[in-house]
Image: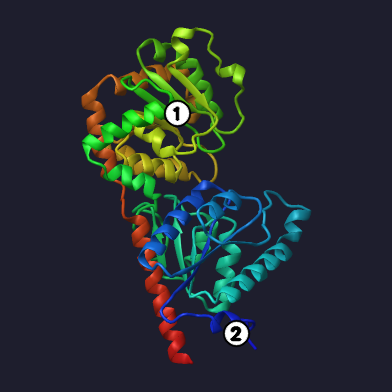
Amino acid sequence: MNDRTSGQSTARDHRVAGVHRVVLAGGGSAGHTSPLIATAEQLRILEPGITLTAIGTSRGLETTTVPAAGLPLELIPPVPMPRKPGADLAKLPFRLGASISAAAAILRKTDADVLLGFGGYVSTPAYLAARRLGIPIVIHEQNALPGLANRLAARFTRHVATSFPDTPLPHARWIGLPLRSAITELADADDQTRQRLKSEGRSALGLDPDMPTLLVTGGSQGALRINRAVVDARAGLLASGIQILHVLGGRNITDADVAITDPQTEARYLPVGFVERMELAYAAADLVLSRAGASSTLEQALLGLPSLLVPYAVGNGEQARNATSVVKAGGAKLLDDATLTGDILATEVPAILDDPAVRTAMSQAARSVASADAASALARLTLEVAASKQKTSGEQR
C-alpha cells in the first residue's frame, strides 16, 4: 500500500461529490498568516461547502490568528534552520523528516485535493510531503525576492503566484498580495465614505478628527530605530500641528522613552503597543511611516496612503525590493534604516503632510501598483487546480 492511499479510506468515504479539500500551509509571522487567512475567506465565498485545513507549528502567530478566523489548524514539528555548523545542523535531516511525515499524515487524513503554500519554515515540509504523495501544489510568494521554501517548491509546480510583478521564480504569475476584506472594503469606499471612516477611525482611537495624522508602525515586533527617530522628532512634529499614532510593537522601547510631560502636546501623541483593527489606523492616517514588509507596503498602496518606507536590512534584502515598485511609481519615499534620525523625519514628514498636492499625487501613484482582487484570484487558481486533481483521480478509479 503506497503513501497516497494508505490510511485514506475514512476521508474518502465521507467525501461529497464536487466539494474540494484544500490544505493551506503558512505560519510564523503575519506576513505568511495574513494572506493565508484572506485567501481562505475567498475560498469559502467561492465554494461555501469547501473543506479547509491549515498547517502550522506551535511557535507562530498561526496558533491564535488561524483558529480566530474559523480555520481548523493542524500542527507539525517546527524545523529551525541552524545559522552555523553544530549539533543542530546534524539534527536537521531527522527533524525535517519528522516534520514531513507529520505533514503527510495531515494531507492523507484530509484527502487533500491541493496544497496551497505561502512559504516560510512551515511550508517546506508540507511541500515535500505533497510532492511525495502526488498532491498538486499552488504557491504564493509574498515578497519581491522569494524565500527558500518557495524557491524549492517552484521547481516542482507550475502554479506560482506572486505579490510583485518582477519576482524571480519559474512560472511566476503576478496576482498581487491577498489582503483581508477589511482592507479591500476600505480601499473600495468612495471619497465621502472614506472621509466618514477617517473621522470614525480617529474618534475610535482617541485622535483629533481634524488634525493631519502620521501613523507610525514597525510591524508586530516593532522597529527600534524607527521608534527612536520618532521620539527624537516628536516635539517638532507636534509643535507644527501634526498628531502621531505611534504603534510601538514589541517591547523594544520603554514607557519612559515615549512619555510626555507637557499636557498640551500629550493629547496629540498616542503611543500604543498594537492596534487590533489596523484598518481603523489606516483610515485615520494621512501618512504612514513603516517598514517595507509585503503586507504593510501593499496594504498602504492599495489604500492610497502616502508612505515613508524604512526597509529592514536583514534576510535577502526583500524589504528593499518590496518597496521598489511603489517608490518608483511615486507613492512612497525610501528612507535608509542605518542613517534614520529624528532630524530626517522632522524634514520629510511635514514636506508631505503640509502639501495637499503632494499627498494627492502620492496617493494616486500608490494605488497604481496594488491589486484588490489578489485573494479572489488566488482562490480561483487553487480551485482550478483542485478540480483538475479530482477529475484525474476520478478517471483513475
Picture layout, residue 313 above or below residue 179:
above
Point out residue 223 in the picture as x, y percentages from the top left corner: 54, 31
Could you tell me the amino acid type at mark 2?
A: Ser
Residue at 58% from the left image edge and 49% from the top image edge: 64
Above or below, 12 against 344 in this view is below
Secondary structure type for disc 2: helix
Which residue is drawn at the image coordinates 67% and 49% (left, top)?
83
Q: Is label 2 or label 1 in front?
A: 2
- The amino acid type found where label 1 is placed reads Val
Decide which of 359, 17 is in the foreground and name it: 17
**Left or right of 28, for residue 190:** left
The image shows residue 91 at horizontal and vertical percentages of 75, 60
Name the residue that disc number 1 marks: 216
Answer whether labels 2 and 1 touch (C-beta < 8 Å).
Answer: no
Tell me what residue is drawn at x 28 percent, y 19 percent.
354
Q: Is residue 20 above or below residue 46?
A: below
Dot 1: element: strand
The coloring applied to the image is rainbow
- Earlier sequence position, callout 2 versus callout 1: 2
**x, y (%) of residue 397?**
48, 92
Give the alpha-carbon distance from disc 2 to disc 1, as whole Å. Answer: 53 Å
x 50%, y 18%: residue = 231
* Residue closer to the observer: 299 or 338: 299
Identify which residue, 229 or 383, lies in the foreground: 383
Determine the image quadrant of residue 98. Answer: bottom right
Q: Is residue 323 above or below residue 108?
A: above
Drawn side of residue 355 relative to residue 269, left or right: left
The residue tagged 2 is 9
Q: Nearer the viewer, residue 336 or 195?
A: 195
- Badge 2 crowding class, 10 Å Cα cut-off, few under 14, some 14 to 19, many 20 or more, is few
